[in-house]
Amino acid sequence: MNAGRRISRIALATGLALSFAAHAFGVRRTEDPLALVPAGAATVGVIHWNELRSSPIGAQVFSQMDDVSTDGDAARFLREMGLTPREDIDTVVVAMTHPAASGSNDGLVIFEGRFDLARIAAAVVARGATRQAGASGEYYRLANEGGKHDGAVALVNARLLIAGGVTAVVEALARRESGGAGGLMSGQGQGLGKHLSRIDRDASAWALVDLTRFPSTQNREAHVDVHVESAEGPSRAIVGVMKSVSLLALQASVHGDSIDVSASGLSDDAENRDLLVDSLRGVLAMWRIAMQEKSPELVSVLRGFRIQNDGEGVSISGTLPGSFLKTLAAEHRARK
């Protein structure tokens, strides 16, 4: 009996120790790529490659990517890493903190997919990268042509890669270890995180842009007075009124061979919101007139777009059918 009780106590103590260790060292770690984006990001965008892969539109996109990856140095590098983007990458998250800074080193790109870590490591080392041991995990500092390190990549695990400026990658690794502390998802009361509800995070692709962080929108007036007299009036008015827009939200969702698209801009100036609505309606009317002779079947597509003013911002949304996208693709090929 005594021996049995001692064994039970040892087992219980071991279990408690393991539980404490897991709580202390592993329970807070996050693999959510959005949690790795800094809370102060000026832009964040997400592309779900796995959704595009299964759609007719995705087939067209990836066929163009194949043209890029069939020759040249980029293609050789992909082969060395054993990486086929259209098959191995599921999600790409792109973020930037200081878009206005010249030579900024804070860009961040996060990849989810299936990766051969040993092969990728060998490929980057062969090109001059050096392995670094950081407090929150290892990463490779990349060498540019001049021999200076200006970027980094962290081979986190077989499902997750982090690339970007050295500081951006190191800080992303720290956010991963701390469960996303200081990241986009840590407190949605500030930064772009508070605007995540304005987009569908399950959309095939989406982006949030803080326009107040871009040079062209700095020192803008609360109200923008735009006077136009030419035929391009609505387009010019849109450009002018965008100076009062603080946030831009974009998203696209693939459904078969069509795409649902939407764009919205926030503005705290009611008059500018009304002007933006009028300008967008004017642009759509101009496009319908232009399409009437060239492509009359697309007039109904433009008529299907909706423009709304919700009291905080203005949005435009609609569906681009496969026929329209094929026409665009054909025109693009003809211009080559």
Image: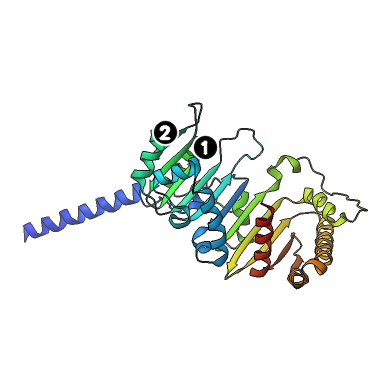
Type of residue at label 2?
A: Ala
Label 2 neighbourhood size at 10 Å, few (<14), some (14-19), many (20+)? many
Image check: 87 left or right of 262? left
Looking at numbered disc 1 in the image, what kind of residue is underneath it? Answer: Gly
**Mark seen at residue 289:** none
Give the side of residue 112 with respect to residue 264, left or right.
left
Q: Residue at x 78, y 51 (%)?
A: 242
Query: What residue is at 60 percent from the left and 65 percent from the top?
Result: 253
Residue 3 horizontal/vertical position (percent):
6, 57
Q: Position of residue 298 (x, y in %)?
A: 74, 70
Q: Left or right of 106: which side holds 161?
A: left
> Which mark, residue 129?
2
Q: Image height check: is 89 above or below 149? A: below
Say which of 218 and 142 sits in front. Answer: 142
Q: Position of residue 280 (x, y in %)?
A: 80, 61
For the residues labelled 1 and 2, say whether their Cβ atoms are less than 8 Å apart. Answer: no
Query: For residue 290, which quarter of the picture?
Result: bottom right
Q: Position of residue 205 (x, y in %)?
A: 58, 59
Q: Name the one closer to the observer, 25 or 109.
A: 109
Q: Nearer the viewer, residue 244 or 325?
A: 325
Sequence-first tag of 1 and 2: 2
Task: Label 2: state its secondary structure.
Answer: loop
Residue plotted at (59% across, 69% down): 257
Question: In this orientation, does residue 185 appear?
Answer: no
Residue 80 appears in the picture as rendered: yes
Q: Which residue is mark 1?
A: 165
Give the label, 1 or 2, closer to the camera: 2
Q: Residue lying farthest right? A: 229
Quadrant containing the N terminus in the rendered view:
bottom left
Nearer the observer, 154 or 210: 154
Gap between marks 1 and 2, in whole Å? Answer: 13 Å
